[in-house]
Image (tube, grey):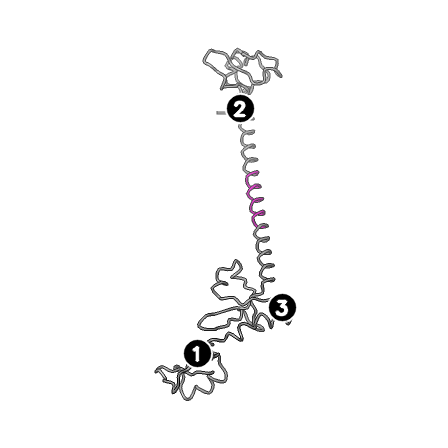
Protein backbone atom coordinates (compact mmCIF):
# COMPACT_ATOMS: atom_id res chain seq x y z
CA UNK A 1 0.00 0.00 0.00
CA UNK A 2 1.14 3.55 -0.73
CA UNK A 3 -0.11 6.14 1.73
CA UNK A 4 0.22 9.88 1.21
CA UNK A 5 0.43 12.09 4.30
CA UNK A 6 -0.22 15.82 4.61
CA UNK A 7 0.00 18.52 7.25
CA UNK A 8 -3.63 17.90 8.19
CA UNK A 9 -4.86 14.50 9.27
CA UNK A 10 -6.61 12.49 6.56
CA UNK A 11 -9.40 10.21 7.71
CA UNK A 12 -9.71 6.94 5.81
CA UNK A 13 -13.12 5.70 4.78
CA UNK A 14 -12.30 2.32 6.28
CA UNK A 15 -9.94 1.03 8.96
CA UNK A 16 -6.45 0.22 7.63
CA UNK A 17 -4.76 -2.93 8.96
CA UNK A 18 -1.18 -1.60 9.00
CA UNK A 19 0.14 -4.65 10.83
CA UNK A 20 -0.48 -6.92 7.86
CA UNK A 21 0.46 -4.52 5.10
CA UNK A 22 3.72 -3.37 3.60
CA UNK A 23 3.24 0.35 3.34
CA UNK A 24 5.26 3.08 1.66
CA UNK A 25 4.40 6.34 3.36
CA UNK A 26 5.06 9.47 1.27
CA UNK A 27 4.92 12.85 2.98
CA UNK A 28 3.48 15.53 0.67
CA UNK A 29 3.26 18.26 3.29
CA UNK A 30 6.25 20.12 1.84
CA UNK A 31 5.08 19.95 -1.78
CA UNK A 32 3.06 22.21 -4.05
CA UNK A 33 1.09 21.44 -7.19
CA UNK A 34 4.05 22.64 -9.22
CA UNK A 35 6.63 20.48 -7.43
CA UNK A 36 4.54 17.36 -6.92
CA UNK A 37 5.25 15.56 -10.19
CA UNK A 38 9.00 16.08 -10.00
CA UNK A 39 9.00 15.02 -6.34
CA UNK A 40 7.19 11.75 -7.02
CA UNK A 41 9.18 10.81 -10.10
CA UNK A 42 12.74 11.89 -9.38
CA UNK A 43 13.42 11.98 -5.64
CA UNK A 44 13.44 9.59 -2.68
CA UNK A 45 12.89 12.25 -0.03
CA UNK A 46 10.13 12.14 2.61
CA UNK A 47 9.45 8.44 2.10
CA UNK A 48 9.19 5.85 4.83
CA UNK A 49 8.68 2.10 4.60
CA UNK A 50 6.34 0.59 7.19
CA UNK A 51 6.16 -3.16 7.89
CA UNK A 52 8.41 -3.96 4.95
CA UNK A 53 9.34 -7.26 6.61
CA UNK A 54 9.08 -9.45 3.52
CA UNK A 55 11.79 -7.44 1.76
CA UNK A 56 14.00 -7.07 4.83
CA UNK A 57 13.87 -10.74 5.75
CA UNK A 58 14.96 -11.76 2.27
CA UNK A 59 17.96 -9.43 1.89
CA UNK A 60 20.56 -11.77 3.40
CA UNK A 61 19.12 -14.75 1.50
CA UNK A 62 19.30 -12.89 -1.82
CA UNK A 63 22.95 -12.00 -1.27
CA UNK A 64 23.69 -15.59 -0.20
CA UNK A 65 22.31 -16.88 -3.50
CA UNK A 66 24.87 -14.63 -5.20
CA UNK A 67 27.62 -16.14 -2.97
CA UNK A 68 27.91 -12.94 -0.93
CA UNK A 69 27.77 -13.04 2.85
CA UNK A 70 26.01 -10.04 4.43
CA UNK A 71 24.16 -9.04 7.60
CA UNK A 72 21.39 -6.46 7.89
CA UNK A 73 22.27 -4.40 10.97
CA UNK A 74 20.85 -1.30 12.58
CA UNK A 75 22.84 1.90 12.19
CA UNK A 76 23.04 2.10 16.00
CA UNK A 77 25.15 -1.07 15.89
CA UNK A 78 27.37 0.50 13.24
CA UNK A 79 27.93 3.52 15.50
CA UNK A 80 29.73 1.38 18.10
CA UNK A 81 31.62 -0.73 15.56
CA UNK A 82 35.45 -0.53 15.98
CA UNK A 83 35.74 0.41 12.29
CA UNK A 84 32.81 2.84 12.17
CA UNK A 85 35.07 5.38 10.46
CA UNK A 86 35.97 2.81 7.81
CA UNK A 87 32.58 1.15 7.30
CA UNK A 88 32.41 -1.93 5.07
CA UNK A 89 28.68 -1.64 4.41
CA UNK A 90 27.32 -2.13 0.90
CA UNK A 91 27.49 1.06 -1.17
CA UNK A 92 25.77 2.22 -4.29
CA UNK A 93 28.08 2.57 -7.26
CA UNK A 94 30.42 5.57 -6.82
CA UNK A 95 28.79 6.43 -3.45
CA UNK A 96 31.04 7.77 -0.69
CA UNK A 97 28.93 6.44 2.18
CA UNK A 98 27.21 3.07 2.83
CA UNK A 99 23.69 2.41 1.63
CA UNK A 100 21.08 3.11 4.33
CA UNK A 101 17.74 1.28 4.39
CA UNK A 102 14.73 2.48 6.35
CA UNK A 103 11.90 0.51 7.87
CA UNK A 104 9.46 1.46 10.63
CA UNK A 105 11.42 4.61 11.45
CA UNK A 106 14.63 2.61 11.96
CA UNK A 107 17.72 2.74 9.80
CA UNK A 108 19.77 -0.22 8.64
CA UNK A 109 22.91 -1.01 6.67
CA UNK A 110 24.02 -4.12 4.83
CA UNK A 111 27.25 -5.19 6.51
CA UNK A 112 29.90 -7.44 4.96
CA UNK A 113 31.04 -9.45 8.03
CA UNK A 114 34.05 -11.11 6.39
CA UNK A 115 35.38 -7.78 5.16
CA UNK A 116 34.64 -6.25 8.57
CA UNK A 117 36.71 -8.92 10.33
CA UNK A 118 39.58 -8.42 7.87
CA UNK A 119 39.55 -4.63 8.32
CA UNK A 120 39.53 -4.98 12.10
CA UNK A 121 42.54 -7.32 11.92
CA UNK A 122 44.34 -4.91 9.58
CA UNK A 123 43.67 -1.94 11.85
CA UNK A 124 44.83 -3.92 14.91
CA UNK A 125 48.02 -4.86 13.06
CA UNK A 126 48.54 -1.23 12.01
CA UNK A 127 48.12 -0.14 15.63
CA UNK A 128 50.54 -2.86 16.80
CA UNK A 129 53.15 -1.72 14.28
CA UNK A 130 52.62 1.92 15.28
CA UNK A 131 53.09 0.96 18.94
CA UNK A 132 56.34 -0.85 18.11
CA UNK A 133 57.62 2.17 16.19
CA UNK A 134 56.75 4.50 19.09
CA UNK A 135 58.46 2.15 21.54
CA UNK A 136 61.60 1.93 19.41
CA UNK A 137 61.72 5.71 19.12
CA UNK A 138 61.40 6.03 22.90
CA UNK A 139 64.14 3.44 23.43
CA UNK A 140 66.39 5.22 20.95
CA UNK A 141 65.66 8.53 22.63
CA UNK A 142 66.55 7.02 26.01
CA UNK A 143 69.79 5.56 24.62
CA UNK A 144 70.75 8.94 23.18
CA UNK A 145 70.03 10.58 26.53
CA UNK A 146 72.16 8.03 28.42
CA UNK A 147 74.93 8.39 25.85
CA UNK A 148 74.96 12.18 26.32
CA UNK A 149 74.97 11.77 30.09
CA UNK A 150 77.84 9.29 29.86
CA UNK A 151 79.79 11.69 27.66
CA UNK A 152 79.23 14.50 30.17
CA UNK A 153 80.41 12.28 33.03
CA UNK A 154 83.51 11.27 31.11
CA UNK A 155 84.26 14.89 30.27
CA UNK A 156 83.89 15.91 33.92
CA UNK A 157 86.11 13.04 35.01
CA UNK A 158 88.71 14.00 32.42
CA UNK A 159 88.77 17.54 33.76
CA UNK A 160 89.10 16.22 37.31
CA UNK A 161 91.94 13.93 36.29
CA UNK A 162 93.79 16.83 34.68
CA UNK A 163 93.25 18.97 37.75
CA UNK A 164 94.36 16.11 39.98
CA UNK A 165 97.59 15.64 38.05
CA UNK A 166 98.49 19.27 38.70
CA UNK A 167 97.68 19.17 42.42
CA UNK A 168 99.91 18.18 45.33
CA UNK A 169 99.42 14.46 46.01
CA UNK A 170 99.68 15.12 49.75
CA UNK A 171 96.16 16.59 49.56
CA UNK A 172 94.71 13.30 48.39
CA UNK A 173 92.49 11.13 50.57
CA UNK A 174 90.99 7.73 49.84
CA UNK A 175 87.66 9.15 50.97
CA UNK A 176 87.67 11.32 47.82
CA UNK A 177 88.40 8.41 45.44
CA UNK A 178 85.79 6.94 43.10
CA UNK A 179 86.53 3.40 44.32
CA UNK A 180 85.91 4.23 47.98
CA UNK A 181 82.89 2.38 49.40
CA UNK A 182 81.41 5.30 51.29
CA UNK A 183 78.52 3.22 52.61
CA UNK A 184 81.06 1.17 54.65
CA UNK A 185 82.63 4.22 56.28
CA UNK A 186 82.02 4.34 60.05
CA UNK A 187 83.72 7.58 61.09
CA UNK A 188 86.63 5.50 62.36
CA UNK A 189 89.17 7.07 60.04
CA UNK A 190 89.36 3.98 57.83
CA UNK A 191 88.54 4.09 54.11
CA UNK A 192 87.19 1.03 52.32
CA UNK A 193 88.60 0.55 48.84
CA UNK A 194 86.19 -1.28 46.53
CA UNK A 195 89.05 -2.48 44.34
CA UNK A 196 91.50 -3.41 47.09
CA UNK A 197 92.12 -6.89 45.66
CA UNK A 198 92.95 -5.82 42.11
CA UNK A 199 94.96 -2.84 43.33
CA UNK A 200 96.79 -4.75 46.02
CA UNK A 201 95.83 -2.35 48.80
CA UNK A 202 94.58 -3.13 52.31
CA UNK A 203 90.82 -3.66 52.57
CA UNK A 204 90.70 -1.37 55.58
CA UNK A 205 92.50 1.33 53.68
CA UNK A 206 94.31 4.17 55.44
CA UNK A 207 93.03 7.41 53.83
CA UNK A 208 96.61 8.54 53.28
CA UNK A 209 97.19 5.62 50.91
CA UNK A 210 95.71 7.82 48.18
CA UNK A 211 98.86 10.00 48.25
CA UNK A 212 100.87 7.22 46.59
CA UNK A 213 98.11 5.29 44.78
CA UNK A 214 98.52 5.35 40.98
CA UNK A 215 94.84 4.48 40.46
CA UNK A 216 93.44 7.36 42.50
CA UNK A 217 90.56 9.14 40.76
CA UNK A 218 88.81 11.98 42.50
CA UNK A 219 85.03 11.82 42.75
CA UNK A 220 83.06 14.36 40.77
CA UNK A 221 81.17 16.80 42.98
Q: Answer with mark 3 or mark 2, whichever residue precedes in sequence.
A: 3
Q: Answer with mark 2 or mark 1, whichever residue precedes in sequence.
A: 1
Horizontal arrangement in the rendering, residue 9 relative to residue 135 (left or right) = left
Horizontal arrangement in the rendering, residue 9 relative to residue 200 (left or right) = left
Q: Residue at x 55, y 41 (%)?
A: 141
Magenta segment's dominant SS is: helix
In the rendered view, tell whether residue 38 sits above or below residue 86: below
For the residue labelled by badge 2, is the local secondary structure a helix, a strand or a loop?
helix
- x and y percentages locating residue 167 in the rendered image: 52, 17
- x and y percentages locating residue 89 in the rendered image: 55, 67
Q: Nearer the viewer, mark 1 or mark 3?
A: 1
- Disc 3/disc 2 C-alpha distance (Å): 78 Å
Magenta stretch? 129-143
Q: Which mark is residue 160?
A: 2
- Disc 2/disc 1 C-alpha distance (Å): 96 Å
- How dense is the environment of label 2, judged by Cα within 10 Å: few (below 14), some, or many (20 and up)? some
- How dense is the environment of label 1, judged by Cα within 10 Å: few (below 14), some, or many (20 and up)? few
- x and y percentages locating residue 111 in the rendered image: 56, 66
Q: Answer with mark 1 or mark 3, whichever residue precedes in sequence.
A: 1
- x and y percentages locating residue 80 in the rendered image: 48, 60
* Residue designated by label 3: 68
**Considering depth in this image, is 220 or 102 the residue closer to the camera?**
102
Residue contact at pointers 1 and 3, CB within 8 angstroms:
no
Q: Nearer the viewer, mark 2 or mark 1?
A: 1
**Considering depth in this image, is 133 or 45 the residue closer to the camera?**
45
Q: Which mark is residue 18?
A: 1
For the residue labelled by badge 3, is the local secondary structure a helix, a strand or a loop?
loop
Q: Is residue 80 magenta?
A: no
Q: Residue at x 47, y 70 (%)?
A: 107
Amino acid sequence: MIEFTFKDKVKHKQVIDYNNLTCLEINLSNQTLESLEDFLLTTEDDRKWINNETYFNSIEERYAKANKKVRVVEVSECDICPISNNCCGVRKKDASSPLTLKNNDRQYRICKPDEKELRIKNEEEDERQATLIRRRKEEQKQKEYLRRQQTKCEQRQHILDEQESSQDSSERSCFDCTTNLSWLNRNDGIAHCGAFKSMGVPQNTPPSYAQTCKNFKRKAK
